[in-house]
Amino acid sequence: MAFDPIPDGIVCVPDYEAPARERMGENAWAYVGGGAGDEATLAENRAAFARLRLNTRVLAPMRGAHTRLELLGQALEHPILIAPTAFHRLLHRDGEAATAMAAAATGSLMVVSAQASLPLETIASGARPAPWFQLYIQPDRAFTLALVRRAEAAGYAALVVTVDAPVSLRNREQRAGFRLPPGVEAVNLRGAAAPPPAQSTSEIFAAVEHAATWEDIAALRAATRLPILLKGILTAGDAERAIEAGAAGIIVSNHGGRVLDTLPATIDALPAVARQVAGRVPVLLDGGIRRGTDVLKALALGAKAALVGRAPLHGLAVAGAMGVAHVIKLLRAEFEVAMVQTGCATPDAIGPEVIWRGP
C-alpha cells in the first residue's frame, strides 16, 4: 500500500475540505459533499453544533484522565467511530483497505458500508478493533441473510442496519450527472436481485414496495448472533420501537442530510431520544462532526460515542490511510483538550452540565 504525504498547513479537520474537493473532482464531490434538496439539513447539522456553547470548569482533578470506553462488549480507545460510507475507491486507489489501516493505527472502530468498493472480508482483515458491518435490508431477504452470514464469518462484531434511506433525491448529484467511474462498484452487493415490478405507476412508490419494516428488524434479530444497531433514528417513538424490536443500540442520524431535507440536526434530536432510551441501550450520533468539541457536545447530550463520515473521506482523498489517521488524530486531540477545559477526566464524566445554558 502506498502512503501519501499530508500537505503542509493542515492543522484541523476543516482544513482537509478544500484540498479534498480539488483532488476528488466535481463528480465525486457531488456525491460525497451533497445532500438532499436545498441541503438545509446538511448545513443545519453543522450550525446546530456551532450554536451550542460549552461551560469551562477550572481546577478540576485530571489525574488518570483517559478517553477509553466499552461499547457492546468491545473495549475502545476513544469514542470517535468511523461511520459507514460507500465507495472509498472513488476517492483513493486503496479504498476501504486504507481506511481500515487508519482505523487500526488510531484504535478507531470502523463501520463498513454494505456499498464498500472492496470485499467485506478484505476490509475486516485489516481493521482493529473488530469492525461493524452496515446493512441495508435488500428486497431479496435471502440475499440480505447471506450478507449477514458473511459478516459473521469475517469477524464483524455488530450489524448496523440503516433504516432511514429507502429512497432519496439529491439535486447536487443530479446536476453533476454523477456516475461511478469504471472499476468502482458495490462489490458486496453483486448478485442482489432487483425489486420486482410494482403495480404503482410511481417510481418512488415502486422502489419502496419491498422496503424493510419493523417486522424485518425482529426477524433479523432472531436470525443472527450479532448485536444490531439501528441507524437513522430521530424520534423518541422510533427509539422505543427499536428497543422493542430487539435493537442493541441506536444511532441518531439524518443520513448526513442526504435523504430528506429540512429534518432537524442530529444534535438537536439527540436529547429526546436519549431521554426515552434512558440507558437501556447505547445511543450514538452522527452528522456534522468536524471538531473534537462536537464529540464532547454529543456525549454531553446523551450519546455514548460519535461517528464521523465525511471527514475521514476528505482525509482519504487527500492522503490515503495517512489522511484518515490524521483526521482521527486531530479530532481526538481536540476532544481531549475539550475534556480538560470542561473538567471531565473520562468520557463517563461528560454530562449536560458542560453545556452552557446562559446566565
Image: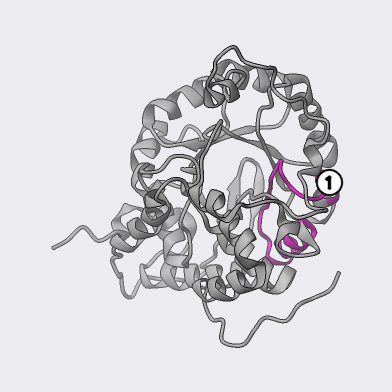
Residue at point 82%, 56% (across, down) = 126
**Other residues around mark 1 within 10 Å, as few (<14) / some (14–19) / many (≥20):** some
The vertical placement of 274 against 11, above or below, is above
Q: Is residue 37 visible?
A: yes
- Mark 1 lies on a secondary structure that is loop
Coordinates of residue 237 in the picture (x, y in percent): 38, 26
Classify residue 193 as left or right of residue 315.
right
Looking at the picture, tell me which residue is in the foreground, 10 or 172. 172
Q: Amino acid at mark 1?
A: Pro
Q: Is residue 304 visible?
A: no
Classify residue 12 as left or right of residue 194.
left
Quadrant housing residue 93: bottom right
- Magenta part of the chain: 96-122
Residue at point 78%, 25% (across, down) = 143
Looking at the figure, which quarter contains the N terminus?
A: bottom right
Coordinates of residue 311 in the picture (x, y in percent): 57, 63
Coordinates of residue 182 in the picture (x, y in percent): 80, 54
